[in-house]
Image (spheres, rainbow, N blue to C red):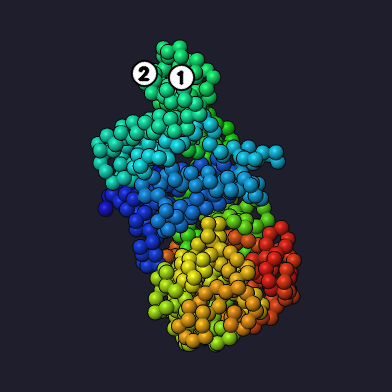
């Protein structure tokens, strides 16, 4: 197997000859099996550095940048598992996802992690991350291109990488990549012209569209008087003229500004090839100034500090961390370190909908803490109070889509569940999968997902002191069997407090595999990796016991629970509205 030529790879000897599209297809095929980490690891190695460097341009610290970059990878990996992620254009998709998550941060308390110029003022209705009018056509055109064309344009024009890099990512030879790159440039220009026509506000814009394209393509000199007059009073066509000018290195800048918006020029100028060229010019003393220099933040994004974080993350098990985030395989232990306390925006912490984070520090690079195994929660059989049957899986199959049904309680592995502090109801037999309550009339196995992912509440529940198991997406429903006989589907019913809607965690019997796996949840995925930490998606809360007795330091409460979190879920900003739980 050949060594990778990719300049962003933190390790030599990585997979070469395996295109990104093939890696995308491998994700999920062997989840939970030996070697399942390899496609994740390779995609991280290829794309982590530029993604983390761009994240730093958007944030106030390296810690916040680590959170943002890890969140972007996690979200795209989850999308890929759901067959909605990228295939060939991974780099631009990851950077766009950084942009999207930063937009989400800008409207809640996580705005403190963003660069101050990204934080909206009280009188603002949007942020500086919105695509500006003078880049709307280019944004629309780029996103409509086939993924291989986007991959070529981004790596060649924006990242200024040698052509063999995108060729390797696409699994084609450099000669073919050169021909396809030229075709991609042509298609992008045509897409810009089409976008100009599609969004034209006036009939005259349509009439001048072709003439405008030809005139700009020929250099823009000698515009006919009618076109000049129209451009002078039409913003749409004036902006189109600017976006159709692809001369010099304008194409790469245009694409970066259209896709990234914020700090696009900073990202563009900080690419390694351009940095090296400027440094080389400076050493030779040619042209005096070595080109545009960036102070403070921009230079830090191009510095060894960010490269050190990327290399450290990949070298000590960062791949395992992000994989664990994707399938929800780790939970934080809180610890005494402020980085895991959720108290400071500059720490590597997470807010209610933030992702988990790398807990590396500037003073101790590569330090990664906590145990991947859950430290809290309940593990055992879910026994129904009304019919004394347990929740099992139909046919005892552990594949996505398998329905939940009642069965006579025994020691079968598929009857054992782990109720975790963040509300996940995880299968002990297949720790990558959780009970999903929102896919159909009956509960079924689905992928365990990170808390910030759309649909995260579909696999999360609140377990009250009285034994009600309530889906977080609808507090008026409760988990209950369809009938009183074994084999009845487990469904959702309007809450009425009957015993048949109440469950007890039976922890008297350990599952057959429990002793051997020591409940490391995904031990095959994390085997051989350095210990990693995932920060809690909400402030830690006491976990209910199987007997219904209050946790130390708290008292049981019914109805609305004051305090930071009222098991379950409670809320944020000091109040909760879940039934049952603990009042601190």
Q: Residue at x 62, y 79 (%)?
A: 467
Give neighbour class at mark 2: few <14, some 14-19, many 20+ (Cα, 10 Å). few
Q: Which callout, 1 or 2, points to the residue nearer the camera?
A: 2
Q: Is residue 3 left or right of residue 142?
A: left
> Picture coordinates of residue 101 (x, y %)?
55, 48
Q: Secondary structure at mark 1?
A: loop
Q: Which mark is residue 222?
A: none
Q: Residue at x 63, y 37 (%)?
A: 117
Which residue occupies the foreground of this view, 402 or 398?
402
Q: What residue is shown with label 1?
A: 287
How many marks on residues? 2
Distance between mark 1 and mark 2 Cα atoms: 30 Å
Q: Is residue 22 left or right of residue 252?
A: left
Which residue occupies the foreground of this view, 58 or 234?
234
> Picture coordinates of residue 451 (x, y %)?
55, 60
Residue 471 lies, with reference to residue 103, above or below; the image says below
> Picture coordinates of residue 489 (x, y %)?
48, 78
Residues tagged 1 and 2 counted as in contact (Cβ below 8 A): no
Q: Residue at x 49, y 54 (%)?
A: 75
Q: Which mark is residue 218?
A: 2
Which residue occupies the foreground of this view, 116 or 80?
80
Of labels 1 and 2, earlier in sequence is 2
| Quadrant of the rendered image containing residue 319 | bottom left
């Amino acid at each position: 197997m050949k060594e990778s030529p990719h300049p962003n790879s933190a390790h030599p000897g990585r997979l070469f000859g395996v295109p990104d599209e093939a890696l995308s297809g491998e994700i999920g095929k062997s989840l939970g099996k030996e070697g399942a980490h390899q496609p994740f690891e390779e995609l991280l190695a290829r794309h982590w550095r530029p993604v983390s460097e761009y994240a730093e341009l958007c944030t106030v610290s390296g810690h916040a940048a680590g959170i943002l970059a890890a969140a972007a990878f996690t979200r795209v990996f989850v999308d890929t598992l759901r067959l909605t992620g990228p295939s060939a254009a991974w780099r631009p998709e990851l950077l766009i996802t950084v942009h999207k998550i930063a937009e989400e941060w800008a409207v809640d308390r996580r705005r403190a992690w963003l660069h101050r110029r990204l934080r909206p003022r009280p009188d603002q209705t949007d942020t500086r991350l919105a695509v500006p009018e003078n880049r709307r056509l280019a944004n629309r055109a780029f996103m409509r291109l086939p993924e291989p064309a986007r991959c070529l344009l981004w790596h060649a024009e924006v990242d200024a990488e040698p052509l063999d890099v995108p060729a390797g990512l696409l699994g084609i030879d450099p000669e073919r990549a050169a021909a396809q790159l030229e075709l991609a440039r042509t298609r992008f220009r045509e897409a810009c012209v089409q976008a100009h026509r599609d969004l034209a506000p006036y009939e005259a814009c349509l009439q001048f569209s072709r003439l405008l394209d030809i005139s700009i393509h020929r250099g823009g000199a000698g515009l006919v008087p009618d076109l000049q007059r129209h451009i002078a009073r039409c913003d749409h066509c004036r902006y189109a003229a600017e976006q159709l000018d692809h001369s010099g290195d304008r194409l790469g800048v245009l694409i970066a500004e259209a896709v990234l918006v914020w700090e696009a020029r900073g990202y563009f100028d900080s690419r390694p090839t351009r940095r090296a060229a400027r440094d080389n010019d400076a050493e030779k003393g040619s042209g005096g100034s070595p080109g545009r220099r960036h102070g403070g933040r921009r230079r830090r994004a191009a510095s060894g500090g960010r490269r050190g974080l990327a290399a450290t993350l990949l070298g000590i098990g960062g791949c395992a961390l992000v994989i664990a985030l994707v399938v929800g395989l780790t939970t934080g232990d809180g610890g005494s370190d402020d980085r895991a306390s959720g108290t400071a925006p500059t720490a590597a912490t997470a807010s209610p909908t933030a992702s988990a984070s790398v807990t590396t520090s500037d003073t101790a690079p590569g330090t990664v803490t906590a145990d991947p195994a859950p430290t809290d929660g309940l593990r055992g059989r879910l026994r129904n109070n009304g019919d004394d049957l347990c929740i099992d899986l139909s046919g005892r199959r552990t594949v996505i889509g398998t329905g939940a049904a009642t069965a006579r309680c025994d020691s079968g592995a598929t009857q054992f569940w782990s109720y975790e502090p963040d509300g996940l109801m995880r299968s002990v037999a297949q720790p990558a999968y959780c009970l999903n309550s929102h896919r159909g009339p009956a509960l079924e196995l689905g992928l365990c997902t990170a808390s910030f992912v759309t649909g995260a509440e579909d696999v999360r529940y609140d377990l009250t002191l009285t034994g009600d198991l309530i889906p977080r997406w609808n507090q008026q429903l409760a988990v209950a069997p369809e009938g009183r006989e074994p084999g009845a589907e487990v469904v959702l019913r309007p809450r009425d407090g009957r015993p048949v809607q109440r469950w007890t965690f039976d922890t008297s019997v350990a599952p057959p595999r429990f002793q051997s796996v020591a409940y490391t949840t995904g031990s095959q995925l994390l085997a051989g990796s350095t210990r990693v930490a995932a920060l809690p998606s909400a402030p830690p809360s006491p976990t209910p016991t199987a007997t219904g007795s209050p946790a130390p330091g708290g008292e049981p409460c019914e109805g609305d629970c004051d305090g930071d979190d009222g098991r379950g879920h409670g809320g944020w900003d000091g109040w909760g509205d879940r039934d049952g739980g603990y009042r601190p």
